[in-house]
Amino acid sequence: MEKEFANRSVPLLVLKLGVPSMLAQFFNILYSIVDRIFIGNMAEGGDIALAGIGICAPAVTAVTAFAAMVGIGGASCMSISMGRGDRALAKKSISNAFFMLILISAAVTAAVLVLKRPLLYLLGCSDVMYPYASAYLTVYICGTPAALLCLGMNQFILAQGYAGKGMAAVVIGALCNVALDPILIYRLNMGIAGAAAATVISQTLGACFVLFTLRDKNMPVPLRFCGIDTGVIKRMLIIGAMPFFITILDNLMLILLNMQLRRYGGASGDVYLTCAAVVQSFTVLINCPGQGITNGCGTLFGFHYGAGMYKRLMRIFICVFLLCASYISILFAIAQICPEPFVRLFAKDGYIVSRSCVFISRYTLGILGVAVQFAFVDGLTAMGKIGCAMPLSLFRKGVYVLLVIVMPLILPLEAIFYVGAVSDIIGSVFTFSVFYLFISKRLKKEMLSAQ
């Protein structure tokens, strides 16, 4: 594997690792999108139930942020170690990541179950929505161990260059979810709880596949218990803190948006929240596969940084950006030209459909800027350069939060759906400028002096 990473064409490596990981994340989001489609088309209460799932979305994503923290942090440590030829440290990384995921999943499950009611109301839940949101979150959170192991440990399959197997783990779960949703929701009359149960069962199958794959003796760095190493755990969590806090902040941004829609929406508050759930479903189609590309290529960033290959590293940044931009351009065109077929998967009410189409178009006007964030911020994170990556990401999020707070005070409420576009454009210009003018020069000096 090390010889292939060091000598093979950079564009081919990016395609080999990035495309399967992108497709894997595309299938992964079927968990949430398929749930929303079936729930939104329920004969009774579909619109309110859909809004209830939208309310749960930040909590669900926050839970999976722990998988990103341990998985991306641990996989980055392993990739950097392999680039430096330290296979013993690479083995400790995967072993300690497994231990941390088990520990965290138990703590998170208990905490969410205890704090469920105040948490949902904090997220903007109404009394009408609460029975739906509560039923969904209760069942879903019981599957936290499977979710964290599937998502977190799959990063170690990707980091070893097995993007196809990483994709297979996600596809297995996604197809299972698609098959189980109509059975549990409609035939067994479980409603919104059935959607959550289908997701939990599917994630359990995915987790089993991931663990069996990592236990295979033919893996370059198989999963074996190597003892608890606090130094490895500390390094893993330092690197993983970046994707963790970014995911949490992204959720806080959605929570703030929902709170503003609730606060200023008046009698139409539930309608706006339903539309927001549809908009968020579309942006997930953009963000998750885009992040899949950077997750799949994370091992390339870490390996080449660890090996001191500066020129190849810069080519990786460029190729990852181009791949992300190519994918996002397709979704941008759909959002601007024909979003209605997508919206009608979730909603039947004509007014909700028409407003959701308008809001998707507004929210995604600057979405191409996200490709810059993915390539440069996630690439720096995979290299362990948290001090460089964090300010770039926080700047864009700060712009978003400021606009969400200020816009309803000076403009009609529906203008709030422009915040995504404006923050994406400003954030991407800032990120590229800082990387080109300062960070790339610092990396060159550091890596060349280390040789």
Image: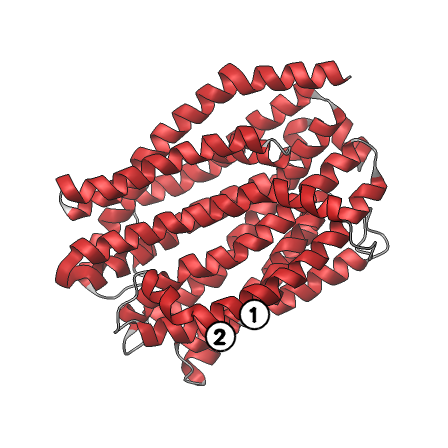
Query: Which element is circle 1 on?
Result: loop
* Residue drawn at point x = 55 percent, y = 36 percent: 378
Q: Against 88, is 148 above or below?
A: below
- Number of other residues with Cα within 10 Å of mark 1, as a class: few under 14, some 14 to 19, many 20 or more: many
Quadrant of the rendered structure where residue 135 is? bottom left
Residue 252, given in percent of the width and then of the height, sits at 38, 50
Q: Amino acid at mark 1?
A: Gly
Query: Which element is circle 2 on?
Result: helix
Q: Is residue 279 left or right of residue 200?
A: left
Residue 430, given in percent of the width and then of the height, sits at 41, 24
Quadrant of the snapshot with the N terminus: top right
Q: Is residue 301 left or right of residue 137?
A: right
Residue 327, given in percent of the width and then of the height, sits at 47, 39
Q: Is residue 159 visible?
A: yes
Numbered mark located on residue 139 in the image: 2
Between the residue at mark 2 and the residue at mark 1, the CA separation in whole angstroms equals 7 Å
Q: Is residue 365 visible?
A: no
Callout 2 touching callout 1 (CB < 8 Å): yes
Numbered mark located on residue 143 in the image: 1
* Residue drawn at point x = 33 percent, y = 61 percent: 122
Q: Amino acid at mark 2?
A: Val
* Residue drawn at point x = 71 percent, y = 15 percent: 448
Question: Considering depth in this image, is 79 or 442 the residue closer to the camera?
Answer: 442
